[in-house]
Amino acid sequence: MPELPEVEALKDFLTEHLVGHEIVRVLPVAISVLKTYDPPVTAVEGHEVVAVHRYGKFLDLETDGGPRLVTHLARAGWLHWKDRLPDGVPRPGKGPLALRVALETGAGFDLTEAGTQKRLAVYVVGDPQEVPGVARLGPDPLADDFDEARLAALLTGERRQIKGALRDQGLIAGVGNAYSDEILHAARMSPFKPTSTLTPEETRMLYEALRSTLTEAVERSRGLAAGRLKAEKKSGLRVHGRTGEACPVCGDTIREVSFSDSSLQYCPTCQTGGKPLADRRMSRLLK
């Protein structure tokens, strides 16, 4: 899933390539991608893009007096930029193409989604706050006013595991499964640690890990073409998606805890005092 650093990089890329250009065609190929119907998606046609914004994992294309095109790429969605779009109208089918946006220059982008779970979402709205997912977002962890005291205040009263708290978009915007693993590894903290047990020193370590991990990921992605962002994300991850590999900090073997539709990775030596966490799915399989 694209998370804050990748979506921030896409925002910068689209700012460079879209701003100042007119949207001449919007072609929905998979109707399921459209989450609004009034105004219609064609209402952005004939309008110039004046700015691109990011809200958590949402991208917002602002036009000159027209409605805004807001996108959430979900778990398996992606944006593919093309300096020259193919001629003709794409036909609906079983392929990954969900929506195409064409500019007056002949360039544009495709939104695609792999897999069978179609969660890619496109909204056409007058204000991004009309999108329910945007309206419920917590503060952006890279905002200038997001300091250690703000994080401490957000976690006060929370009674759940820290991994889940970091992924809650209503609490902190933009962090998903991959970067929550990376943040907790940098903070040397178990993903199962209850938020209610955090000491002031642990909150400080978590804040520093949160800011540094996301800032470094954004810097690695900055200036890259849209097509290279996925590979950059994977290459920069130290524990997430690296089950069975050696931890780059201590050399211990990175372990995994699996859930019904996702998994987390962690280093026992760095994060859990050397003790493996219980993997309930594996435990059931071994019975």
Image (cartoon, grey):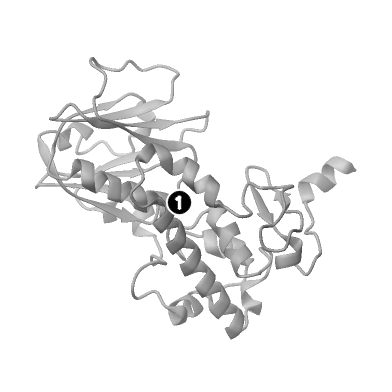
Q: Residues within 10 Å of mark 1 (few under 14, many from 20)?
A: many
Residue 271 in sight from this viewpoint: no
Q: Position of residue 124 (x, y in %)?
A: 24, 41
The image shows residue 153 at horizontal and vertical percentages of 47, 79
Residue type pointed to by label 1:
Glu
Instruction: Give the side of residue 267 with respect to residue 56, left or right.
Output: right
Q: Position of residue 115 (x, y in %)?
A: 52, 29
Of the pair 242 and 140, the residue shown nearer to us: 242
SS at circle 1: loop
Residue visible at 43% across and 25% down in the picture:
96
Q: Residue at x 49, y 41 (%)?
A: 231
Task: Name above or below for residue 3 compared with residue 249.
Answer: above
Give the position of the C terminus as an image quadrant: top right
Residue 110 occupies quadrant:
top left
Query: How far from the left and from the top, in percent, is residue 100?
Result: 28, 28
Decide if residue 181 is on the left or right side of residue 270: left
Identify the residue under disc 1. 3
Say whether residue 165 is visible: yes
Residue sitting at 64 percent across and 66 percent down? 161
- Left or right of residue 206: residue 144: left
